[in-house]
Image: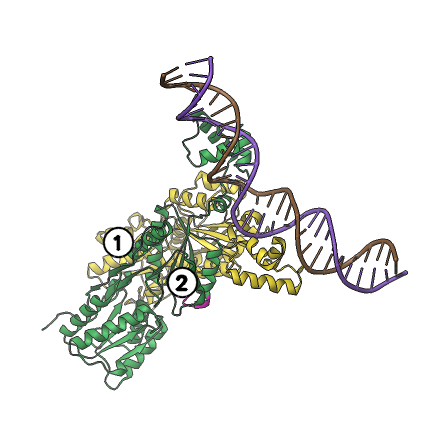
Chain colours: A yellow, B green, C brown, D purple
Amino acid sequence: MAGIKDVAAHAGVSVATVSRVLNDSPRVSEETREKVVAAMRALRYTPNGVARSLRTEATRTLGLIIGDILNPFFAAMARAVEDEARAAGYTVVIGNADERPEQQDHYVRTLLEQRVDGLLICPTAETTPLVEDCVRAGSPLVFLDRTLPGLDVPAVRADGTAAIHDLVRHIHRLGHRRVAFISGPELLSTGRERTRAFLDAMRERGLDIRDEYLEAGDFQAASGRAIAARFLDLPEPPEVIFAGDNLMALGALDEIRARGLRIPGDVALASFDDVAWFVHLDPPITAITQPAEELGRRAVQVLLSRVERRPVESVVLPARLVIRRSCGETETR
Amino acid sequence: MAGIKDVAAHAGVSVATVSRVLNDSPRVSEETREKVVAAMRALRYTPNGVARSLRTEATRTLGLIIGDILNPFFAAMARAVEDEARAAGYTVVIGNADERPEQQDHYVRTLLEQRVDGLLICPTAETTPLVEDCVRAGSPLVFLDRTLPGLDVPAVRADGTAAIHDLVRHIHRLGHRRVAFISGPELLSTGRERTRAFLDAMRERGLDIRDEYLEAGDFQAASGRAIAARFLDLPEPPEVIFAGDNLMALGALDEIRARGLRIPGDVALASFDDVAWFVHLDPPITAITQPAEELGRRAVQVLLSRVERRPVESVVLPARLVIRRSCGETETR
DNA sequence: GTCGATCATGTAATCGTTTCCATATAGTCC
DNA sequence: GGACTATATGGAAACGATTACATGATCGAC
């Protein structure tokens, strides 16, 4: 493959000059520039980004380590990250951590070796020593969606507290009293936050929370289904099931359907995390929507601020309740 | 950041030796290896992949240029590509072409500059000169899901012909005669193939295809909805609407629901492309499922064969009909 | 006509690895 | 004990760009 030397020879100039036209330096005459451009075209020259990166210590590449690209919420964030990065002239390398700390570490290591300019991580449950090292070493790191306690890393995430309060009020006004929550893992900041908000909101409305109405899943569909089944098997089953993410809501939905129960007549359903097809369900599912795209975009902006050593602040965006029909139709009060 | 030189100095050996332990060369004594490993640990040495790539002319990186990561079919392929690549020791750079040839070109150019070892492309409609250049230059290229006519590039894709014949038979046996097809763009190989298979299958069963029952969308939800609306406005609307991909099926579903029509009583619905939530709909949607994960995995295998200069062949996997309830319950014949 | 400024261009060092070749040491064989 | 081989290590040249510094030309001002 042709290199800068070949172009220089072909155009009858030095490599320095070729490099200058490559980088749009003003220090080169129009005439020479044209000669060089012609030579590049003739030789089908493609600049070697690897060599350039070695010299300039910048790869114009961002790493994104994500739980699972199949989860529509993550997919939407990934998409936005990609768009925003491209707009800023960066490409992004995606790593699926699959919620496994060791796989997350694999990607942190690999991407660091590839010398990405910055790293966006949706951290899995545990803080790993490797991540701590990164923080200490000052690698440009930004957490996305979730945070890790005790680490001084800027984070871009949504806060569902207000939306959960709204949801509980909505449910309450609909006349429901017994509401069960399929929570997320206690180890994830998002899981903790949602459980706490739910409990607070219930207490605030004077609704008691029975122990058997609160169980933690793992943010995957199967756990949602199993927990919903246990709720429904209770001597006094809940009137409402609120799932802590879209996949567990899906699992709960399956269980409800499998039992031939009607929503919201027999049991109401609500979900944290909205996904496009909730609105196509019958009835459409009431859900809390997170601004996935904006999270992705903002995360890139924050990360690029860090990369360029500008001051950086964490970002918290509100989630929002979207009332549809799966909890009931008319609010009474 | 510490480099190989620092490690060498710290361990009291030469850079060559450090490099050898880095690459697991057998030509280094156990004693020295330990000294070097200790030095690496002490200095928190992270190998510089950029420098290594420059020297070895290999980046252990694959590029994946895809229509839209938000489309669950593409997301599933991307996920599989990533898994398979990781298993082989590669990372994946993803580019969203968004069905725009110029954006596809942007990524081809960028990834080529970054010297990815191979490129997986889901080509957009038109063949661009840049892609032709790549083929001519012999860059390791594999097409995924779609092909481009007249280019000698291995492709990994699904063939829906048999499944479409099965679907038409299913519909026919259910007693339906008037079936309309929302086809994909004529410019995409998948669009063409599905239309042709549908027409063939209909003819084979002696069903006539009225012109007004065949209209091409762009594989996006909005076009599916608009075309479904036109079908339903016809003096004699179809008994069945078959959508050429999952997003257009979604659009059609919206239109049907908006009109308060019942599925399959008022109009039946079927979709090319299955997505997880079709089964949660009421009624569950009859669909043709493509082996997205296997396509992704096989594509990586084929691409790596090319990269390693082993012989390469295109792969065609069958799509499969999944009968659910959206076309009717009991087949008569 | 000389001086200095400005501009276009060239020379060569550099980035952090890998790897070819050379070299030193030890071990084996006759 | 000398010749040879095997083994462990080091020196230095790549890889393909960027860039600090040097150089020669042109030009205006005095």
Task: Using the rendered image of the protein, determine whether residue A95 is visible from the camera's viewpoint.
Answer: yes
- Give the magenta part as a residue range: B96-102
Give the x, y percent position of residue A287.
36, 62
Q: Amino acid at mark 2?
A: Leu
Give the x, y percent position of residue B223.
35, 75
Chain letter behind tag 2: A
Q: Splitting the image into 4 quarters, where does residue A24 fall?
A: bottom right
Give the x, y percent position of residue A269.
30, 60
Which residue was labeled with disc 2?
A321
Please say if B178 is above or below A201: below
Instruction: Give the side of residue B250 with respect to residue B328, left or right.
Output: right
Work out whether residue B100 or residue B230 is closer to the camera in this orientation and state it. Answer: B100
Q: Amino acid at mark 1?
A: Arg
Residue at the location (34% across, 53% down)? B300
Q: Tell me if residue A126 is in the magenta stretch.
A: no
Chain letter behind tag 1: A
Which residue was labeled with disc 1?
A225
